[in-house]
Each structure stands twice: as structure tokens, then as C-alpha cells.
Image (spheres, rainbow, N blue to C red):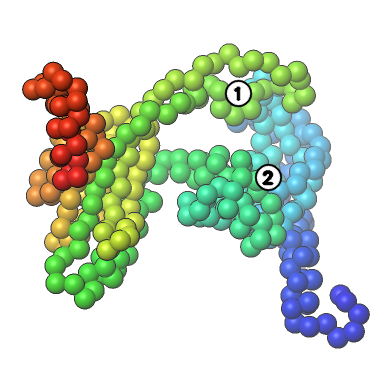
């Protein structure tokens, strides 16, 4: 602390700088003497092949929940055949693999889904006192989304009704709810290229033996039109097949998340047949709109049909563009 009578801001700043050390030490003191029946056992069966494994250790491990770094000294059992092994203390304390623990991962996911990864990393360090680099934010978010569908991550119907009511306040007509659907090809890597490879960490880098492939990521987004701005409602984006995207939209409709009775629904997309097939089947009363960019790019092809002269075709094309 500074000399003299410190201000409240100085006290808060000093404690904030030491909070990870203070709260982490408290957590370490609480979990360190945890009694375990399995810990003193010299042998333990392998969970995969049932071989008796001798105890090794104790091995020190540092984990980071939101309260700060916690040092754990625990024995572990390793099977050289299966290349895996349990740690009784990790199982008893529900310690997850990796340094960042469940509460920290959840906080990182909440930030990364609202702001860019770099901003999420900065805010995470400022709010918690711990550091999660931006390149780490992506795999943490990917792990948090594993096994979740669009309904699990969508806002509740009550929250959606509240957003619709805010946009509809003071207006005679119902607000417009737009469903935008599109797809784009993105480079991807195979599952075999993900994660760490077994073996020593320090070795000379080698050229990867896999090649990326282009896959189409399809997505949809519901948003409200509020004058000159849009109000996000819910969205889903994934490397979908056509039917998988249709199934995701069907889940949204079956969950009654879209308040069709209080909005005017509009579907906008390109000219792909698969897009309009699902839109017509799920929302037949919606107004269907072909987006400007995909419509405008075909005008030049249309103009070449009646006009062989490219100048006349260009002149004909310039007339519909302002109307579109």
C-alpha cells in the first residue's frame, strides 16, 4: 500500500492486482487436504484394459479457475499400453483437462460470443485478472459449443417477445422480422489434424501431411428491422448439409421461438433452390425476396439475349438497377 492514508481507489487497485494470488491461495488451501480413499492405494486398474497400474508421483499440476492459480500435488496412474491413466485427485475435484477450468471456460465463451476474440481476451484479463490469449479463445468456444443445437443457444421465447415489443412500441403496423439464409465455401482441416500429436513436445517442425478442403458453411439469421438499424434475434451457422440446415430451422419452428403472430415475416436469400425449398415448407406465408446482389449480377446475362450490341445491353442494364 502507498504511504499515508490510502484512498478507496488505491485500496481497490492494490487488492485487484493481488486478487488472483489471494483467492487462488484460499482455494488451494481448501482443496489441498481433501481426503481420498483411492489416493494411498499403490495400484489401480486401468479403466481401458484393466491392467494393474502402479502409482506414480506425486506430480505437480497448476490449474486456473476464475479465482486464480491452484497448485495440485497428486499421484497418478499411467498405462503404457493404452497411453492413458487416471488421477484420483483430478476425478474427485472434477478438474478438467488443460489449464483453464470450467468456470473460466464458461466466462471466455460468454465473452467470445458477444465480441471479437481479441476484444474478448482483453476484457477477460481486465475483469478476472487472468490471461487467456485470443488464439486460445477460439478452441475454448468450439469446445463449449460441442453437442449444442441452435435451440440450446437461442434466447428464450420471453426474451424474443421483449425484443419484438421494443421495436413495435409506438407503431401502427407489426414490425418486420427477416430470415436471411446463405452459404459460403470455407477452407477446413480434417479431424486428424486437430489437437496435439502423441510424443515429445520438442521436435523439429515437419510439413503437415494433410491438405485442407473447401466445404460450404450454411447459416441463417433472424433479425428485426428498426428504422435504420437491425435488431438481432437469433442465428445459427455451421458446416451444414442442406438437410441439416433445414432440420435446424425446423427445430426453431417446433420450439415456437419465432413470434409469427406479432411480426411480418420476410425471407431473403439468393437463387439457390435448396434455400427456397426449406423457406416455403417452413414459412409459406412469408414474403420471399431475392437479394439485390444476386439479382443484379444476372441482369448483364439477360441483356445479352435481346441485344447483340454490348453498348445497348449496358444501357438497358443501367435502367433496372436503380429500381432494384
Residue plotted at (61% across, 17% down): 208
- Taking the image as shown, residue 106 lies to the left or right of residue 177, namely right
Relative to 87, is 150 on the left or the right? Answer: left
Q: Which of disc 1 and disc 2 is earlier in sequence?
A: 1
State the residue position of label 2.
99
Q: Is residue 40 above or below residue 168?
A: above
Identify the residue at image location x=63%, y=27%: 196
The Cα–Cα distance between marks 2 and 1, rounded to whole angstroms, is: 28 Å
Is 24 displayed left or right of 124 in the figure? right
Which quadrant is the C terminus positioned in? top left
Question: Looking at the picture, how far across and down is residue 173, in whole percent?
Answer: 14, 67
Q: Indicate the quadrant where residue 5 lies.
A: bottom right
Disc number at residue 49? 1
Quarter of the view holding residue 140: top right
Nearest the viewer among 154 and 324 is 324
Quick one: 281 or 49, which is closer to the camera?
A: 281
Q: Position of residue 301 (x, y in %)?
A: 18, 24
Q: Secondary structure at mark 1?
A: loop
- Give the percent coordinates (x, y) of residue 30: 74, 61
Q: Is residue 221 visible?
A: yes
Residue nearer the viewer, 188 or 170 = 170
Disc 1: CA contacts within 10 A as few (<14), some (14-19) or many (>=20): few
Amino acid at each position: 500500500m502507498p504511504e499515508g492514508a490510502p484512498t478507496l481507489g488505491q485500496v481497490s487497485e492494490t487488492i485487484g492486482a493481488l486478487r488472483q494470488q489471494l483467492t487462488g491461495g484460499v482455494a488451494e488451501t481448501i482443496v489441498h487436504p481433501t481426503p481420498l480413499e483411492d489416493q494411498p492405494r499403490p495400484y489401480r486398474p486401468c479403466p481401458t484394459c484393466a491392467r494393474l497400474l502402479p502409482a506414480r508421483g506425486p506430480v505437480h499440476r497448476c490449474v486456473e479457475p476464475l479465482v486464480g492459480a491452484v497448485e495440485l500435488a497428486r499421484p497418478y496412474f499411467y498405462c503404457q499400453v493404452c497411453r492413458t491413466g487416471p488421477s484420483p485427485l483430478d476425478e474427485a475435484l472434477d478438474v478438467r483437462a488443460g489449464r483453464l477450468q470450467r468456470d473460466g471456460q464458461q466466462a471466455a465463451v460468454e465473452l467470445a460470443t458477444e465480441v471479437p476474440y481479441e476484444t474478448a481476451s482483453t476484457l477477460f484479463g481486465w475483469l478476472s485478472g487472468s490471461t487467456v490469449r485470443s488464439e486460445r479463445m477460439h478452441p475454448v468456444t468450439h469446445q463449449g459449443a460441442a453437442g449444442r443445437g441452435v435451440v440450446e443457444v437461442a434466447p428464450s421465447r420471453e426474451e424474443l417477445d421483449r425484443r419484438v415489443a421494443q421495436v413495435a412500441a409506438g407503431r401502427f403496423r407489426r414490425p418486420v422480422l427477416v430470415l436471411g439464409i446463405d452459404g459460403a465455401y470455407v477452407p477446413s482441416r480434417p479431424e486428424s489434424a486437430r489437437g496435439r500429436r502423441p510424443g515429445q513436445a520438442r521436435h523439429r517442425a515437419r510439413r503437415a501431411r494433410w491438405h485442407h478442403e473447401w466445404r460450404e458453411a450454411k447459416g441463417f439469421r433472424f433479425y428485426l428491422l428498426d428504422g435504420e438499424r437491425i435488431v438481432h434475434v437469433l442465428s445459427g451457422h455451421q458446416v451444414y448439409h442442406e438437410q441439416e440446415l433445414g432440420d435446424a430451422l425446423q427445430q426453431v419452428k417446433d420450439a415456437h421461438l419465432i413470434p409469427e403472430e406479432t411480426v411480418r415475416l420476410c425471407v431473403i436469400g439468393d437463387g439457390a433452390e435448396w434455400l427456397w425449398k426449406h423457406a416455403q415448407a417452413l414459412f409459406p406465408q412469408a414474403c420471399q425476396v431475392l437479394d439485390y446482389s444476386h439479382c443484379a449480377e444476372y441482369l448483364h446475362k439477360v441483356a445479352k439475349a435481346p441485344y447483340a450490341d454490348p453498348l445497348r445491353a449496358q444501357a438497358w442494364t443501367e435502367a433496372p438497377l436503380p429500381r432494384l
